[in-house]
Amino acid sequence: MSYHFLWPPVIKALPHLLEAALVTLNVTSVSMILGTLFGLLLAYGRMSEARLPRSLATVWVEIARNTPVLFQIFFFYWGLGEFGLFLSSYTAVVTALTFNTAGYMAETLRGGFNAVASTQVRAARSLGMTGFQTQRHIVVPQVLRAVYYPMTNQFIWVLLMSSLGMLAGLRELAGETQFFNSRTFRTFEFFTAAAVIYYALAKIVMLLARLVGWRLFRGQVQR
């Protein structure tokens, strides 16, 4: 059985696919930034001696890490509608990816905090630093350095998982690809093109991360 490749429809739609790729990057960046911020709060919650914040943070992390991202997207897009709260496709996908990313980043950051020697904290406090100053100037910079490359991997993961947004009607790269596929029935050609774009985005992100890491850490880039 022969298959005749037909690439002109893909070439014609390429500007739309690249525009959708920008939506993918937007969703990924926003989700990653918010997820990291919430993850930092969850990490502090998990390390807290107070029972309530520790319990709430644990529940968030356990749900985020042990349920499929697809279910989380469906919950925020369709599930909340049962309670009269309707989110747009963009908002639902970003919320779900933020929720999921925060759960993973919380554990990554918690590992980074555990890697900082407690003697450094005591030394900073003995020098007259407040708890906030100690965290800001001593602890957090070391934590960010320790988790920088895991964060880069998490960014790539969110980039790829954002493709699930097509199932909630989001016209990101995967959604736009399916839109043109449904009108041309050139499944192989369109999804091959989308795969190439995803691959290029991932490689560009990795390259930029290495450049930023080299700048931040004076060339001490992990290999």
Image: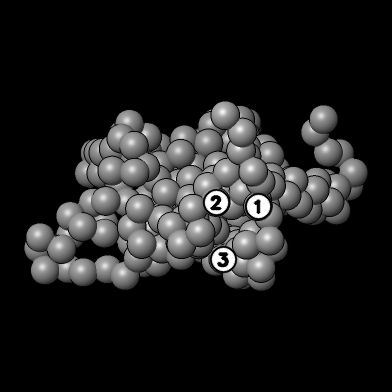
What secondary structure is found at the residue carrying circle 2?
Answer: loop
- Label placed on residue 207: none
Specify the amino acid type for callout 3.
Ala
For the view shown, which residue lies furthest in the front direction?
1
Q: Position of residue 135 (x, y in %)?
A: 57, 51
Compare marks 3 and 1 and give the one earlier in the sequence: 1
Q: Label 1: which residue? A: 6
Q: Position of residue 45 (x, y in %)?
A: 36, 44
Is 202 positioned to the left or the right of 218 in the image?
left
* Residue 197 visible in the snapshot: yes
The one nearer the camera, 81 or 47, is 81
Specify the amino acid type for callout 1.
Leu
Q: Quadrant of residue 51?
A: top left
Could you give the CA–CA distance between mark 3 and mark 1, rounded to whole angstroms?
A: 22 Å
Q: Nearer the viewer, mark 3 or mark 1?
A: 1
Could you give the CA–CA distance between mark 1 and mark 2, rounded to whole angstroms?
A: 7 Å
Q: Label 3: which residue? A: 20
Residue at the location (34% across, 37% down)?
A: 68
